[in-house]
Amino acid sequence: MRLGVEVDGVRQWRSYSLTSPPRPDGVITVTVTAVPDGVVSTQLVRRTKVGTVVHLDQAAGDFTLPRDRPAKALFVTAGSGITPVMGMLRDGVGRLDDVVLVHSAPRPEDVVFGAQLRALAARGGLRLVEVHTAVDGRLTPARLAELVPDFATRQTWACGPNGLLDALQETYDAAGLELRTERFRPVVLAVGDGGTVTFADTGVTAEADAATSLLDTGEANGVLMPSGCRMGICFGCVIPLREGSVRDLRNGHVTTAVDGDAIPVQTCVSAAAGPCHLGI
Amino acid sequence: MTTIQKQDHNPIAHLTAEDVENLGRELDALREKVIASRGASDAAYIRKVIKTQRALEMGGRAVLLASRYKPAWFVGTAALAVAKILENMEIGHNVMHGQWDWMRDPKIHSTTWEWDHASPADQWKHSHNELHHTYTNVLGKDNDLGYGIMRVDEGQKWYPAHLGQPLWNLINAIFFQYGIAAYDLELGKNLSSKKRRNDPGFRERLSATLRKVRRQAAKDYLVHPLLSGPSAPTTLAANLTANLIRNLWTHSVIMCGHFPEGVETFERTSIEGETRGEWYLRQMLGSANISGGPLMHIMTGNLSFQVEHHLFPDLPSNRYQEIAPVVRNLFERYGLTYTTGSLPKQVASAWRKVIRLALPNDFPAKRPTTAPRPTPAATPRAAEPVRVAVAGA
């Protein structure tokens, strides 16, 4: 679910997993870890007071428990990847018969929801395997197979850093098994010189260099682009950037959008800084 | 005055091409400084203005429900007039300029804001943001120079109809919101031939404007009066009065932007190949400020800083005041005239021009037109650091 938070006057959107089960009072919970350079996470964790109004977007995603509860389930998580699984565990408590959770974190005290998970395990609600990377090393598919020998018979959900998910995906694909993943970081967007500009609604794709404005690129390729002063003053050329990065030709500032965004950009003074998708 | 290209004494003759480019660089740096320091307090400012305007408007309209009682009529009308002025000037004009787009708030955004005015937002944005701000004060390109019904520069051709221009100006002032709507539609041009009248694009825009006018009229002259029950006639009169006050005020403020004596105009051909520095220079010379206190600034939508606004139309209006001393210092160092004056003085200056130019240039009884001009410095002095606190910088 996307959360809109005002940081320094600008509304920023980030996706957070729901960690709460459905409640009659409609209260929902997200659990945020402050990332060192994180603009929104540090704002939420350190500077947001009770009573602050935040913005919500429609819940999306398919990282959920199916209606038919799995007979045997395996959750593989690392770091903040525990958050969507926590929501599922809280929702499915009592209705999941055989659950294994393998969670990776640097040290025992770094496990988010540590106390609750251990208590749940003590009550017999799940089998909890903690991998503390500071002493045990990284969690790998091989390690997983050792810890959970019957992993191939379990419906598996994985959430964590892309490295872990990529490795797991490779293993599961090779074995012909289904793996459901939730990724927190998009594929790294190349912020380089120029790129492929996709005019999504018109269905036009074009190569553009770092110095050619998106407006010129669009027009040269037959896209009907709104425009005005063609010099960045009148905002007559604003269209949404849906994905990718563009660079402001006037000062080099880069604006980046990820799937789900619709960041207005001035096409007459912006150039592609990597592949980008425009809403026109 | 006529265009600077045709004057005996060119006010920018002393500037070299390099001077102009340096000027451009200094102004670019100033812009970047403000952009870098935009933040939570700026966002809080516009939200507060919007909240205040809404309270004034709803409060005024609520009081007017009892408008048959004279005190309620006066208080309600005053509140509504101020609310309309605030909405049009400090909020609408500035939001539609994109000054607050950086907040990424879809409700306070140039692409979504619709203002309390007869002219639809997208048509106003075209004629104002795209045409006026690009071609500022260029004869034959910037129609704000007289709105197509007056001549405000010796370089504009005189026609006998101009004899009536003081009257056209007054009528325009009284019906200013409709005047602007007609102007944005380019009615003069578009009604002139059958082909133009029947152009589908024009017909669509005309329909959109008529829809807006109907909605606005229904709000002010039908629904609100009806809701006032027995106070219906007095509420109708109150709304007419509030709209009139808004029209007269905004017309006066807007006239002060580019009509007072001292403001320069430019030949059409002079902007071919215009560099960024030259564009900045044209904005500096083609605009005039109004001096005053905080109340003046907010009631003019910070167009009391017309020069700063024309230099940086997309910077938040609340920041113009702090950069004004830096800009003024720039004028001095480059030997340029910073045109400003009190509201009465500037309005009078604008009206004098309208009256004077109602007559042809060579009319015998005319007095000399060029006001004495301060001699510019021989060469621009090197930039002396000016300590001005840019909030958050």
Image (cartoon, grey):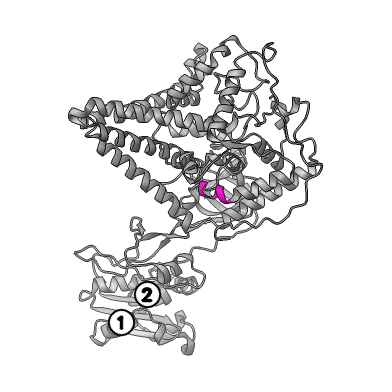
Which residue type carries mark 1? Answer: Leu
Q: Residue A148 versus residue B254: which sits nearer the camera? A: B254
Decide whether the magenta segment is chiefly helix, strand or loop.
helix
A194 horizontally vs A259: left or right: right
Taking the view exactly as shown, the residue that stands out farthest to the bottom is A135
B132 horizontally vs B380: left or right: left
Residue B227 visible in the snapshot: yes
Q: Residue A171 versus residue A28: which sits nearer the camera? A: A28
A223 horizontally vs A129: left or right: right
Rounded to the nearest angstrom, the CA distance separating label 1 from label 2 is: 10 Å
Indicate the position of residue B199 as horizontal and vertical percent values: 49, 19
Q: Tag 1, which chain?
A: A
Residue A249 visible in the snapshot: no
| Callout 1 touching callout 2 (CB < 8 Å) | yes
The residues colored magenta run B317-322
Indicate the position of residue B325 as horizontal and vertical percent values: 62, 49
User: How many neighbours does mark 2 have within 10 angstroms: few (below 14), some (14-19), or many (20 or more)?
Assistant: many
Mark 1 / mark 2, whichever is N-terminal:
2
Q: Is residue B69 magenta?
A: no
Indicate the position of residue B143 as horizontal and vertical percent values: 58, 25
Residue on which disc 1 sits: A117
Badge number at residue B186: none
Q: Residue at x 32, y 73 (%)?
A: A86
Quarter of the image for the N terminus of chain B: give it: top right
Badge number at residue A82: 2
Which residue type carries mark 2? Answer: Ile
